[in-house]
Image (cartoon, grey):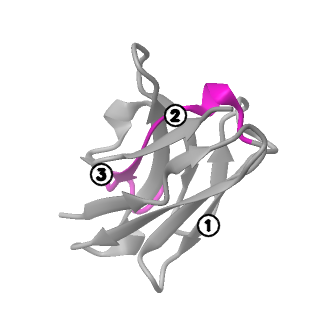
Amino acid sequence: QVQLVESGGGLVQPGASLRLSCVASGGTFTDYAIGWFRQAPGKEREFVAAINWSLGTYIHDSVKGRFTIARDNAKNMVSLQMNSLKIEDTAVYYCAADGSSGGYYHGTQPRHFGFWGQGTQVTVSS
């Protein structure tokens, strides 16, 4: 089974950038699609972006144009580049793996992803 570890969160001002990383271990990395989700206090966990093994991506409309997801299969790593951060981007960000479809994501709900990291806090505040 794959294990996921996120890093790169922090406290930044509005308009700043952050790059989150998710490193996987165990299993075969290309067997998994990787997604990023976020959860703000008192809110449900929501989809942010996903990337399949062959680098096809899907970005949620709420962050399209500001966030970019990338993947390095040689390093078992997925990154989330977040630019022009807004206060409403504040949340715990999680990476997750979907191993049910041969490295392709088959949905954007949390239930579609069977493996999760512990999360990294992103706080955007002036």
Residue matched to label 3: 117
Q: Position of residue 123 (x, y in %)?
A: 54, 37
Q: Amino acid at mark 2?
A: Phe
Q: Residues within 10 Å of mark 1 (few under 14, many from 20)?
A: some
What's the mark number on residue 47?
2
Residue, x 49% and y 59% (percent of image)? 8
Q: Quadrant of residue 5?
A: bottom left
| Cα distance between the residues tagged 1 and 2 | 18 Å
Residue placed farthest to the front in the image?
126
55 horizontally vs 92: left or right:
right
Q: Is residue 106 magenta?
A: yes
* Depth order, front residue of 42/53: 42
| Cα distance between the residues tagged 2 and 3 | 14 Å
Q: Position of residue 124 (x, y in %)?
A: 61, 36
The quarter of the rendered structure image containing the N terminus is bottom left
Q: Position of residue 118 (x, y in %)?
A: 28, 48
Q: Which label's residue is closer to the chain start, 1 or 2?
A: 2
Q: Which label's residue is closer to the chain start, 2 or 3?
A: 2
Q: Amino acid at mark 1?
A: Leu
The quarter of the rendered structure image containing the C terminus is top right
Residue, x 73% and y 31% (percent of image)? 61
Q: On screen, 122 above or below 61?
A: below
Viewer-nearest of discs 2 and 3: 3
Q: Position of residue 90 (x, y in %)?
A: 55, 32
Q: Amino acid at mark 3?
A: Gly
Magenta-highlighted residues: 85-107
